[in-house]
Image (cartoon, rainbow, N blue to C red):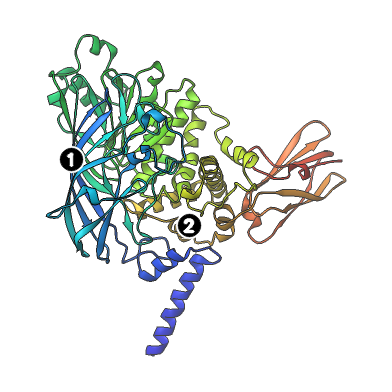
Amino acid sequence: MKYLVILLLAMGSLSETYSQNSGLIIPLEHQQAIQNGTRTNTGVPGASYFQNRADYVIEAEFDPATCILTGKEKIKYQNSSPDTLKWFVIRLYQNLFKPESLRNVEIDPEDFTQGVEVTKLVIGEKTLNPEKFRYLGTNLTVGIPGKLFPSSSVDITVEWKVQLPKKTNLRMGKYGDGSYFVAYWYPRIAVYDDINGWTYDSYTGVHEFYNDYGNYNVKITVPEKHSVWATGVLQNKSDLYTTDIVNRISKSEKSDDVVEVITADDYTKNNVFKTTGPLTWHYLADNVTDFVFGVSNNYLWDAAGTVVDSKTGRRAVVNAVYATPNGKGIAEIGRNTIKSLSDKLIGVPYPYPHNTVWEGNGGMEFPMMCNDGPVEELFEKVFVTSHEISHSYFPFMVGTNESLYAWMDEGLITFIPKAIELESGNKNAHYYVGAYGARTMGTIYDMPLIIPSTEMTQGNYMMQNYGRAAAGFYFLRDAIGDEMFKNVLKEFVLRWQGKHPLPMDFVNTLNSVTGKDWSWFWNPWFYEFGYADLALENVSSVNNELNLVVRKKGKFPVPVEIKVNFEDKTSETIKENLVVWKDSDTYNVKKKFTKKVVSVELGGNNIPDAFPENNVYKF
């Protein structure tokens, strides 16, 4: 009986492995993680999953006129891994601007610096000699005195100085006199995880970031008459702002209407700040992956709040801080975005007390902050605002690895908020599907998404991680239905909130929630070379009965859309989602009409096809 029980348990284990991973391409490191118990075949974190963390107490001074930042920080690093750590990898992202650094982007030569000058580094009780530091790219590697054993922590003290760029706007920078958006500004401990151990990827300007979660206690001193907006919650607003401004802030937190917190008239009448002289702004942020801030002595400030959790009544606020008229309306768009994400699109309440949209350049997301360029057209405003705010879920609420798998967050966030764009009247919100199909699909630049994003150039980085990935998710939702796709997203968020999932954790969640094996779809769209190509074959029409075969000649499964045109200039469309390709490369159509068929057209605006010339048949 004992051996029978063991055999049955083993068969059950094998059944689970097969049902969850049948046909899936599983990287060896993920297979090893499953064996180690940190990951599972079902997409939930394993019983042995671990995650280290670093909590930061930072004091910094910054002058937007000189762009010089000096700081000191105390870090408490917790080693929750089963490993004894012998060294730290410390991220110094501003070393990108050292002349000798490897870069995949252009920077203004006038912004070349000597990078981050670390003037003091203490680990535990030992002060390290800066002359013996080992730098590699934007990383500093230092030995840990006495090592750091499992289930133990160590205190780290760092003092540093850095010249931030004055002309180069790479996700951050100077935006006029007195205004600066500050990011990647403090030394931080790299991620040590269950897949790669320490992460050593150097920042080259293209790929984005992978950070651990931590608490931030930050004080920032700036010149007089400069406001600071930042990740986290401002602790001393009553000491800094006039009573009028404080009351408006409080009003915005309770009202669904847009509140003008700071106006041009307030600057004119000197009705913004309570005191003169340098100002110190104190922010607290809990369990976030980064901390950024914006400084300005002239930006206007609108704010609008909404309920994001109907069960508790919890509210969140979207702030728009801006210098041009294009900033008007951003707070309302942002408020509608966090409401829609919370109630409909993902179904998980927006996780933070605020999101502040800073008018800067381009579009870049941070925890509770966005750096978005000023745009005039409504559709563009809705696009960039909803896109960057939606990143609050991926990669911040769910800590995906942007450095290696940018498509996990960019693909989802290119796709998910398109519903907000459609509601605003943009009828071509899913243009990226056609753009990917026309520009990259099937070419030598169409790299499988499982290839680390760090290995991609700036050109195919954008098209793959935004275009191909978003198209894949778009077709996946079409296949499983809106409600089921939402269930998958919600379950993935709840499983991996505050953790670091891999691509396999998402597809295993997809399989477990739907109860089906999607490897036949997932492998070609996300892990393989290929392209989409459907073709018409054996087309005939006798006595108004249409017969034809649609053949899937390409590797990528896509929906079937057939437009049947009649003699009287009318038409009818036949549609099937891509599930028809699960077990066959052909799809047969046999349908009787009351009118004479004159032609048949295969395809649609949002269905890529490498060889469209075999998609039309005329009688």
Q: Could you tell me which residue is drawn at 31 percent across and 26 percent down?
A: 180
The quadrant in which the N terminus is found is bottom left
When the figure is inspected, residue 161 is found, relative to residue 38, above or below; the finding is: above
When the figure is inspected, residue 83 is found, relative to residue 434, above or below; the finding is: below
Eye-nearest disc, 2 or 1 = 1
When the figure is inspected, residue 259 is found, relative to residue 130, above or below; the finding is: above
- In the image, which disc is placed on residue 72? 1
- In the image, which disc is placed on residue 379? none
75 with respect to 562 (left or right): left
Provide residue 603's location: percent of width, then percent of height. Answer: 70, 42
Count neighbours of disc 1 (C-alpha within 10 A) and say few if under 14, some if 14 to 19, many if 20 or more. Answer: many
Provide residue 402's location: percent of width, then percent of height. Answer: 41, 47
The type of residue carrying mark 1 is Lys
Measure the C-alpha gap from mark 2 to mark 1. 42 Å
Q: Could you tell me which residue is drawn at 81 percent across and 36 percent down?
A: 566
* Label 2 vs 1, first from the N-terminus: 1
User: Residue under circle 2?
Assistant: 507
